Image (cartoon, rainbow, N blue to C red):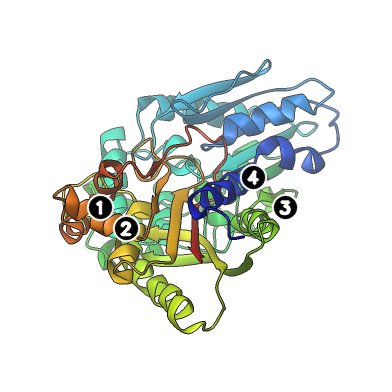
Amino acid sequence: MTPDPRNLLRSMFDAAIAAAQPDLCIPRFLPPRPKGRLIVLGAGKASAAMARAVERNWDGPIEGLVVTRYGYAVPTERIEIAEAAHPVPDAAGLEAARRMRDIAASAGPDDTVLCVISGGGSSLLALPLDGISLDDKQAINRALLASGAPISEMNCVRRHLSAVKGGRLAALAHPAKVVTLLISDVPGDNPIDIASGPTIGDPTTSADALAIVRRYRIALPKAAEALLVSGGSETVKPDDARLSGSETHIIAAPQASLEAAAFVAREAGLAVHILSDAIEGEARDVGAVLSGFAAQVARRSQPFTAPCVLLSGGETTVTLRGKGRGGRNVEFLLSLGLHLRGIPNVWALAGDTDGVDGVEEIAGAILTPDSLSRAWALGINPQAALDNNDGHGFFGALDDAVVTGPTLTNVNDFRAIVIV
């Protein structure tokens, strides 16, 4: 008996999130107890939960500071939790980053600095280089988010305009031992792109960042552009001696979460095909391509036979054209639905594993075979909604939004297509 697609989709999404919980992933990566202090520093949507997991599994003295998104704090006893804005930084993130810089610089040779980093840290750990104001930083972030650039290129620019990213935080902590635990939210799991790599040596250059700015025609404040042009914004490189004793571990990543979702589907009796954990590109283009795969399965039993599930992860982008409520996962779903044109046997869920798709407190949505017809019955034009970047408005009107609240982790986008 084929399970109810809606319930199966939500069960898979919940399993993907559960597989990346810090309490599950942190303990086996903790470092040995140092002679001196264990100092915990961190940033990201999962960083507070990561800090709590460290506390729960550490039997010695511990101190530190992490910064997470508003609403994502959890109770801790010895590690301070600060909250700040995401995806556009604010003064609270600036102050937390300043304090974190000073704490890192205070570390001695007998100390271990344990850095707990996850997606979202790029905006939460917001300390620009001298000459760049917070207003400048906010304007740069908004321009990057609207540009359509992939996350690796956005973070290259961010690293070269930051006082703590691109290996700078680890360099400040030298000669202490630095151990970094990462929850990956980026395609390919490259540590330099997770929160813009505050403890990771950066192989890219100021010239690379400048080329990205010019490619996407991003208007930079004069001080920021001058730093890139002059090379005065260069980051810490991988062969820098200050990073020689550093350790880096990815403790949770999209692939493991996709495999957890696949287990749920197989237990329900469906074949599962993981297409990729690293799909990038415009959300609407990815929707169009995956609709072709799903339609071929549904109509031709190629390259797979239904009933089955197609899983994928990664991070798509949205080039803003309209004035809707945005969200790359709901934009993907709306495009998918428009290209499927109501094929009766195809259902889908797309959501951000951190619980926030775009800037909405909504993780994503569910697409059903009758989503388009229900929208038309309500007087909603699906194509117009897509043109206006209003996926959240579209699925909200259908009561098909997926709301999780803060998930306390972040392994990027999750997409599941069920073909019955």
55, above or below 198, in the image:
above
Which residue does the numbered mark 1 point to in the structure image? 374
Which residue does the numbered mark 4 point to in the structure image? 20
Label 2: how many Cα within 10 Å (few below 14, some 14–19, many 20+): some
Mark in front: 4 vs 3: 4
**Mark 4 or mark 3: whose residue is earlier in sequence:** 4
Which residue does the numbered mark 2 point to in the structure image? 370
Q: CA distance from mark 4 to mark 2?
A: 32 Å
Q: Position of residue 35 (x, y in %)?
A: 86, 28
Label 1: how many Cα within 10 Å (few below 14, some 14–19, many 20+): some
User: Which residue appears at 45% of the width and 49% of the height?
Assistant: 351
271, above or below 246, in the image:
below
Mark in front: 3 vs 2: 2
Q: Position of residue 195 (x, y in %)?
A: 51, 46
Which residue does the numbered mark 3 point to in the structure image? 244
Secondary structure category for the residue under label 4: loop
Q: Looking at this rendering, what residue extends furthest in the front direction?
A: 1
**Mark 4 or mark 2: whose residue is earlier in sequence:** 4
Identify the image quadrant of residue 105.
Answer: top right
**Mark 1 or mark 4: whose residue is earlier in sequence:** 4
User: Which residue appears at 60% of the width and 38% of the height?
Assistant: 172
Residue type beneath disc 4: Ala
Say which of 57 and 91 sits in front: 57
Q: Are marks 4 and 2 in contact (CB under 8 Å)?
A: no
User: Which residue appears at 80% of the width and 27% of the height?
Assistant: 58
Q: Looking at this rendering, what residue extends furthest in the top direction?
A: 77
Secondary structure category for the residue under label 2: loop
Q: CA distance from mark 3 to mark 2?
A: 57 Å
Q: CA distance from mark 4 to mark 3?
A: 29 Å
Residue type beneath disc 3: Ser
